[in-house]
Image (cartoon, helix red, strand yellow):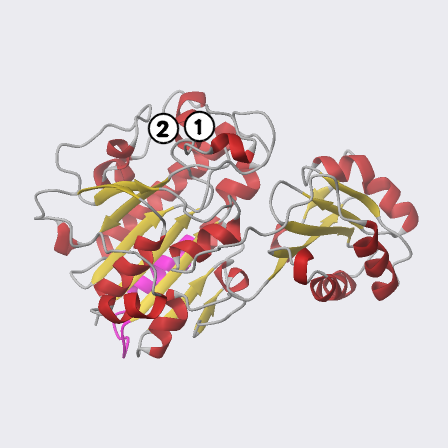
Amino acid sequence: MKRAFLIVLDACGVGAMPDWQEFNDPASANTLANVAKACGGLNLPNLEKLGLGNIIELQGVKPQTNPLALWGKAAEKSLGKDTTTGHWEMAGLMVDNPFPVYPNGFPAEIINEFIQFTGCGGVLGNIPASGTDILIQLGEKHLETGWPIIYTSADSVFQIATNVSKIPLETLYSWCEKARKILCNKHEVSRVIARPFDGNSAKEFYRLSEYRHDYAIEPTGETILSFLQKNNCQTISVGKIRDIFCEIGIDQFTEGKSNEACLGNIISLLKEKNQTKPQFIFANLVETDSHFGHRNDAKGFGLALEKIDLAIGECLKLMTQNDLMILTADHGCDPTVAGTDHTREYIPILAYSKAFEEKSNKNIGIRPSFLDTATSIADWFGLSDNWIKTIKTESESYIQTQ
């Protein structure tokens, strides 16, 4: 009974794509390489064995003569560098029209409709900002007025921050649901995000990540999740995947607000040996992005990677010939460059199964899009021909590399 695990190391890009200028990124953006340098080298023995050091030069991570995994990287074909675009493309769904972004804040008609529809009285902010900086700037004013803090970023997001001592969580979630209804047509942002926080002053404010909630738009076409679900394969999400895909195509939701929780759940799933049908497990490890990339914390990023590596070691011990694990990313978020936004980067690919260990050539090269990941997963389950006919988009499997 085959299983496939697709694990997204959020924001772990491996170098600026050729069109970096179009996304206002620096040419030097290279999340993993720059994090490794800032940390004086990384200790990632399990990812090293798989071949991470073969993809790009990483301080502390040696290239392998015969790595365990198929290795390479992929370029993003869709015009974006955000969570939704990256995840949809690796799930087989191209984003042909970029989601709208708001470098100058949201237009008056959107804000006015939000105020009227929610009855919140007014808003604070309405600017692009770091999620932590905006609390320092406007958190105390929010406590005085009760008005929600509205902010965005270089991504297509409408974020609402409120203090739980002032605004109940239920109210924040209700405001987000109403914002989701308002933001449609040309203003259909990829995600509305509830950002609750706590604390009594600018020096004390902190975000309550465990109560964050994303309100994404529904996938506009078939994804590998819905395809496999229709083809007698159980689909399981771990972490924020359920939000990114609006629960569509997912049979079982496994929570995980932290990397530790998500990795623990993945290991628990690997230990289960009594499944009654093939399984596809789609997971996101968010903290490299949310806790460290966006906060310009390279050393924290490096420590998070080392903890992930330890868990990957446990996963490798539990895998059988019938298991496939693909480690990849959705974009970059280089904590060493100016700004706090995502960076348009290539993403790494490490595809491992015990069935691949005897392959003579494991270099899958540079894939022209993230789409090949979904096709490879379909191929693992013997469904690649039907999948390619379904998506009608040029894509090919890389797990057949010899």
Q: Nearer the viewer, mark 2 or mark 1?
A: 1
Hey, what amino acid is under mark 1?
Val
Picture residue at 29% right of the left edge, 69% below the top = 389
Residue where numbered disc 1 is placed:
35
Residue 394 is left or right of residue 288, and the answer is left
Residue 156 can be seen in this image? yes
Residue 212 can be seen in this image? no
Cα–Cα span, label 2 and label 1: 8 Å
Picture residue at 50% right of the left edge, 48% below the top = 286
Picture residue at 21% right of the left edge, 29% below the top = 63
x and y percentages locating residue 388 in the rendered image: 29, 65
Span highlighted in magenta in the image: 263-278
Residue 303 location, quadrant: top left
Viewer-nearest residue: 110 or 283: 110
Viewer-nearest residue: 317 or 155: 155
Hey, what amino acid is under mark 2?
Leu
Contact between marks 2 and 1 (CB within 8 A): the answer is: yes
- Residue 224 to residue 19: above or below: below
x and y percentages locating residue 189 in the rendered image: 64, 55
- Residue 310 to residue 391: above or below: above
Any magenta on residue 267? yes
x and y percentages locating residue 245 in the rendered image: 50, 64
Residue 310 location, quadrant: top left
- Residue 19 to residue 119: above or below: above
Q: Secondary structure at mark 1?
A: helix
Checking the image for residue 42, the label placed there is 2
Residue 306 is left or right of residue 384, and the answer is right
Residue 367 location, quadrant: top left
x and y percentages locating residue 89 in the rendered image: 42, 55
Disc nearer the start of the sequence (2/1): 1
Q: Secondary structure at mark 2?
A: loop
